[in-house]
Image: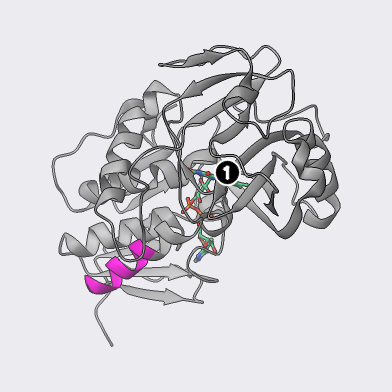
Amino acid sequence: MSAAPDVAVVGGGIVGCALAAFLAEGGARVVLYEREAIAAGASGRNSGVVQDPLDPALTALYEESLEHYRTLGHGFELPAEPAGLLLLGEHPERPPGEATYVERARELEPALAEGLAAYRLETARPVPPAAAAHAFAARAREAGADLRVGTPYDGESAGAVVIAAGPWSAELLDVPVTPLWGVVVELELPDPPRHVLEEAGIDVLTGDAGIPDVLFSAVTARGISAVGSTFLVERPDPEALAPRILSHAERFLPGVSQARIRGLRACARPASADGRPYLGMISERLAVATGHGAWGITLGPASARLVADQLLGRPVEIPPALNALRP
Ligand SMILES: Cc1cc2nc3c(=O)[nH]c(=O)nc-3n(C[C@H](O)[C@H](O)[C@H](O)COP(=O)(O)OP(=O)(O)OC[C@H]3O[C@@H](n4cnc5c(N)ncnc54)[C@H](O)[C@@H]3O)c2cc1C
């Protein structure tokens, strides 16, 4: 019988895999439990963009994560320059931070519909959706972590346990995280946009009770545009929702009507009450890293580094706005 690990990590998404890598590289004996496959959840089916979440409480995590991504390797490549983000609408509200107003968005993106204005922000780097989780998983294995894929966590003993099970974390401990389901349609557009496109107001995540809320977004990488998305409490039927997503997207990108559909992705965001993750120790031997909502790829590496440092006993302060023990 092998000795209990120093740390058991639950969940093989971006957060769990980055945790396993940082912990193992820091000298801990790590076992990661993933009940399905690495990146089986949102970490493998997201829209695939690393971008400024436009929340000052998250800026440091975003900037640190960019640094982790620049040196990650293992099949992950961060674009050197951002593609640029266009927040679109007839009269879009000015976002926080530095943004340039463009009265006729078509002048920047000829594929856009007439009558749209935009704020352009110098952010948004498209990446393949699952690449970050797989690269951190490879790094974790290299550093000696034992990744038990296909194995649900069953309460095995360990020096400490860290729950990074995305929206399913609430099944394992008392944390106010709920699933917010998104469906994305993969399209081959006749004239794919160069910018990342978002309908202004995408930060407003829920519609009227029971009514699916669809907000337009499009992220293009290697000729394929991931067009979304929905924000639903109940698990959706992606096939049934795709026509609604596409007809909404046509208002922004008329070329959608002639696009070839390449696939559909559905997955659940781990949504917290205030849009910010829950990070750190919640009792002597139990930690959590979840609740990244719409921004887990963008923030996951830095969140994992903070929690890993805490578990390794290094001096670290989890910012109060992100602390798992905040009210
Ligand atoms: C449509 C959509 C588009 C998105 N686009 C972006 C984007 O462009 N940029 C961005 O930054 N973020 C994006 N996100 C958000 C991002 O994908 C998530 O925040 C992130 O992937 C969450 O990562 P995670 O590791 O916390 O959880 P998950 O990826 O959900 O991983 C949790 C893992 O835990 C496993 N698990 C659960 N319970 C157990 C158990 N008991 N035992 C063992 N394993 C268990 C699951 O199988 C799963 O693999 C998007 C999300 C959606 C839905």
Q: Give the residues in magenta.
A: 135-144
**In the image, what residue occupies the spot 32% across and 49% down?**
304
Q: Main secondary structure of the magenta part?
A: helix
Q: Which quarter of the rendered picture does the N terminus lie within?
A: bottom left
**Which of the 4 image quadrants contains residue 28?**
bottom left
- Asked whether mark 1 lies closer than 8 Å to ligand 1, one says yes
Please indicate, yes or no, whether residue 117 appears anywhere in the rendered image: yes
Is residue 134 depicted above or below 298 in this figure?
Answer: below
**In the image, what residue occupies the spot 53% across and 13% down?**
101
Amino acid, disc 1: Val
Q: Nearer the viewer, residue 73 or 290?
A: 73
**Apparent side of residue 256 relative to residue 274 in the rendered image (left or right):** right
**In the image, what residue occupies the spot 41% across and 65% down?**
134
Q: Secondary structure at mark 1?
A: strand
User: Is 141 included in the stretch rendered in magenta?
Assistant: yes
**Apparent side of residue 10 relative to residue 166 in the rendered image (left or right):** left
**Apparent side of residue 313 relative to residue 84 in the rendered image (left or right):** left
Report the label total.
1
| Residue 314 picture location, percent across and down | 14, 46
Please indicate, yes or no, whether residue 201 appears anywhere in the rendered image: no
**Apparent side of residue 76 relative to residue 257 in the rendered image (left or right):** left
Q: Which residue is mark 1?
A: 219
| Residue 38 picture location, percent across and down | 47, 68
Is residue 233 depicted above or below 224 in this figure?
Answer: above
| Residue 133 picture location, percent across and down | 42, 60
